[in-house]
Amino acid sequence: MTTHTTTTDADLSAQQISGVGQLRLRPVDPDADAALLHGWTTHDKARFWEPTPADVEGTRAVYQAIAARPGHDAFIGEHDGRPAFLVERYDPRQDAVGSTYRVQDGDVGMHVLVAPSGEPVAGFTRAVFAVVLDWLFADPATVRVVVEPDVRNDAVRRLNAQAGFVVHREVELPGKRAALSACTRADYGRARPSLLRPGPVHHLTPQRWDAANRTLVAKALGEFAHELLVRPEPLPDNRFEVVADDGRACYRFTARRYALDHWLVDAASLEYWDADGEPAPPDALRLVTDLRTSLQLSAEILPVYLEELTSTLASAAFKLGPERPGSRQLAGERFQVVEAAMTEGHPCFVACNGRLGLSAQDFLAYAPEVGRPIRLTWLAARRDLTTLALSTDLTEDALLDAELDERVRADFHRRLTELGLDAAGYVLVPVHPWQWENRIAVTFAADLARRDLVHLGDSQDEYQAQQSIRTFANLTRPERHYVKTAMSVLNMGFLRGLSAKYMAATPAINDWLHGLVQSDDELGARRFSVLRERAAVGYLGGASAQAAPSGSPYRKMLAALWRESAVPRVAEGEHVMTMAALLHVDGHGRSLAAELVARSGLDPRDWLRRYLQAYLVPVVHLLYRHDVALMPHGENIILVLRDGVVDRVLLKDIGEEVLVVTLDRELPADVGRIQFDVPAELRPLSVLTDVVDSFLRFLGARLDASGTLPEREFWSVAAQVLAEYQQRHPDVAGAVEELFAPEFARSCLNRLQLRKNDEMVDLEDPAYSLCLEGTLVNPLARWRGVPGSGGRESSGRESTGRSAVLAGG
């Protein structure tokens, strides 16, 4: 049972809130405060408050009972010395709510009532919540705060969401149906800045901006060197130097070099010397300008790329907030907490958080790193102008019954009938609220006027963006589908729309891959599975869309898909996180992957082996057994962990990121969109580039730099896992041998973005959009793993990219 310090010192809660005034708590005096509390709790504003006695004496008795009851306290909140709100703190185990869920150690219940006021103060209620939650979390025994507002109390539910509360489910309590909600310390830490409504650029301070620049310059130098855009020269003092295109300014740093020509630049060591030989803080925008010729940036692309970098820096500055959870905490946190805590973005791309088109306020409302709950906007689209595709085991009514409460569907139906429209002639479409306000309401105004599209309103469920800004998890009902929407912002080489044309085949492609996976013994042994995109919708109307050529962003403005949630796949004692989290390093330099290894208690080699058997083996098997190439980057793989160990993986984002690499395999007609004749020499790059170079090279370096596992042993284990796979499947062992080739083509993602940053890959023919520059020495080639031997070193060509600390210890 949780115990809490009795608060007798009002100064423990006192805060001066800018624009509001001083707020402080004092214990309720049942005798002196009875009349005041009776007035508050019987006011119409308190209609959702717990049943209240009809007279002052009854109110006095209630608060006398609270004062005498262990684990339940009541406090008056004062605003500039005048009573203004009521707070109750209670132990959920001793309350009716404790029978509706599994109470955890550290749970604290909270009730807040703001008194009626004739002179409202802007932001007052949010400030009250901030002060109360600050006070509750100041007690180290508090792990999370629990509330149970009446489901009809929309105002309080919105406020709870702003404060970081997540709705777990609806429960029956005496006198009401309640939305059982909880807020962890990390949830509140992320929510507090927006709760107090700081300016939209509150995070843009000189200190944070300099720190963000130093980190991004280190990443840029490392990745530009990896792609041979710059060639750092060694200095006599065991440092490296990159000289600007003008031959005068320069950047100097220490770095560790690893396999695959990977540079881990020490951000703290960075020095910049301008053309006059004067030092200045590292600056990512200046770096790109200094190297614009080396980076082959055209006059048209340069300003756009600088804007993308600026947005990336602003996001990084926001992520430097002191409330961000550390890696040790994240190792056991729930999925959406981990999603919002990620700081890296794509490990290869330098400008990875561009999101051009968002305002500063939009960033605070929608960016994944802010972790703010939102409600999706819903439209009705004329059925004859819409494609709706469903998995074979799903009907439209079953989808909507599962995704929308009956009351919400009835409201949407009533809205259509009130307009004199036949609801059966329309399809419901979820839309990102930014997309609705900035694109649909403007670009599709004619369609709205004709009632080809009808605005229905916002969802009742609350959602939170995953690492993809346009893909959402349902917070209110986590078992419901993830929803992916179109969002016409420029980010990392694409305007992030969704093609209505592609949506038509998406469920069929997912069904086909799901069936293939389900029928395969090797994948079954790995417990590998896919999160199917079971439904997809796309609107085909709109004058601009119809006039635009194939592939135009105008054809990708209004579409959505529903993807299975990972929540129903998770058993007791398991938790999930995206694989991208393995590359996360917190503000103190601690690796999340290293924390997971420590949490597991396994030898790091054993931990790595189990992860690679769950991840690498299925990717290889799908390619060599089934000619299926995936895009299995960190955000597309969800890890299912138990005690820090990767037990299995779930693959997502299938419809747009899976290929069948040969025309020789017969596919169902509606799956043909994913079939390409990829040259044989490019096929292994779906493993060597997309897995080995674009993810494992970073993970190997992280584990080495953290002192968890030497990089040499990392690649030895990876080679051994592949060799064991070959032994189990001798019929494809010869083909898999190409993954041990001494070298493979160096694929350069930043070069793609620097060349054409609004559509860097042609989705109609992705294999021919590659940008290849020279070769990389394959770290697998030197290890020809023999099962059980721990790997033996090949006598072939030795990697020149082996791990070595070249400077700085």
Image: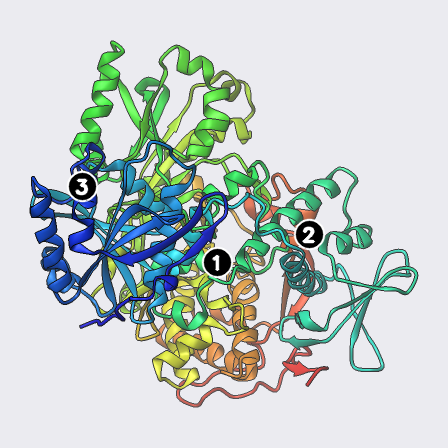
Comparing 508 with 239, the one in front is 239
Q: Nearer the viewer, residue 621 or 530?
A: 530
Residue receiving disc 3: 41
Query: Which residue lies under the disc numbered 1?
Result: 633
Task: Sort mark 3 into few (<14), some (14-19) or many (20+) by Cα contacts within 10 Å.
Answer: many
Task: Give how far apart the Cα atoms at labels 3 and 1 are.
Answer: 54 Å
Cα distance between the residues tagged 2 and 3: 64 Å
Residue for point 40% across, 81% down: 598
What amino acid is at disc 1?
His
Q: Badge 2 is on which residue? A: 751
Q: Earlier in the sequence, mark 3 or mark 1?
A: 3
Q: Residue at coordinates 75% horizontally, 59% vertically from top-left?
A: 229
Q: Is residue 408 visible?
A: yes
Q: Is residue 131 above or below residue 726?
A: above
Left or right relative to 177: residue 141: right
Give the x, y percent position of residue 62.
10, 52
Image quadrant holding the N terminus, namely bottom left
Q: Decide: few, some or many residues near mark 1? Use Cα within 10 Å; few <14, some 14-19, many ≥20.
A: some
Amino acid bearing label 2:
Arg
Q: Are marks 1 and 2 in contact (CB under 8 Å)?
A: no
Position above or below: 31 against 136: above
Q: Secondary structure at mark 1?
A: loop
